[in-house]
Amino acid sequence: MTITVGLVGEQTSTVTETLIATSFGSGSIPVYATPAMVALMEAASVAAINHLLKPDQTSVGTFISVKHLAASALGQTVRARAQVSEVNDRQITFTVQAWDSKQLIGEGTHTRFIVDIERFMKRLSS
């Protein structure tokens, strides 16, 4: 099976003390942190394609541009959805969105690049 436009991945998370802005250092009020939302969007992107990669491959994030549109309180469940919007050889682009129980809280685009794990790790050590 190959990676194609339209593939979808989703991830959910509950807003806990470890995922609020004050814990991340990204704000001063106890609401869902933008870095936590970005991480959930990335995880949804991975979920969309990871099962299609060869065992010696992985994907790495190379770009993300998102708007955090609304705050989410402690205890709320947040769901991120990533849909493949473009495939350019090993570069995969996603449309990403996130919702809490009330509304759309974030949206944007994310790009991942498929890499050979061994070759990628060798570059780090040289």
Image (spheres, rainbow, N blue to C red):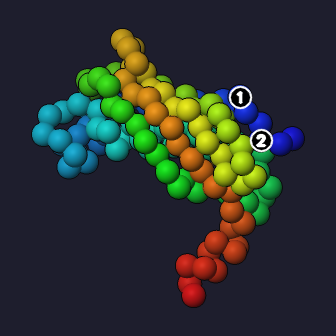
Kind of element beneath mark 1 = loop
Q: Which picture quadrant has residue 73? A: top left
Front-most of 90 and 17? 90
Q: Which mark is residue 6?
A: 1
Q: Amino acid at mark 2?
A: Ile
Q: Residue 75: percent from the left, percent from the top?
A: 31, 24
State which quarter of the image contains the N terminus. Answer: top right
Q: Which mark is residue 102?
A: none
Q: Amino acid at mark 1?
A: Gly
Query: What residue appears at the point 29 percent right and 38 percent down from the top-left corner?
Result: 33
Kind of element beneath mark 2 = loop
Residue of label 2: 3
Reply above or below: 13 against 92: above
Q: How many marks?
A: 2
Query: In the visual, does 91 lie left or right of 29?
Result: right
Q: Residue 112: percent from the left, percent from the top?
A: 60, 50
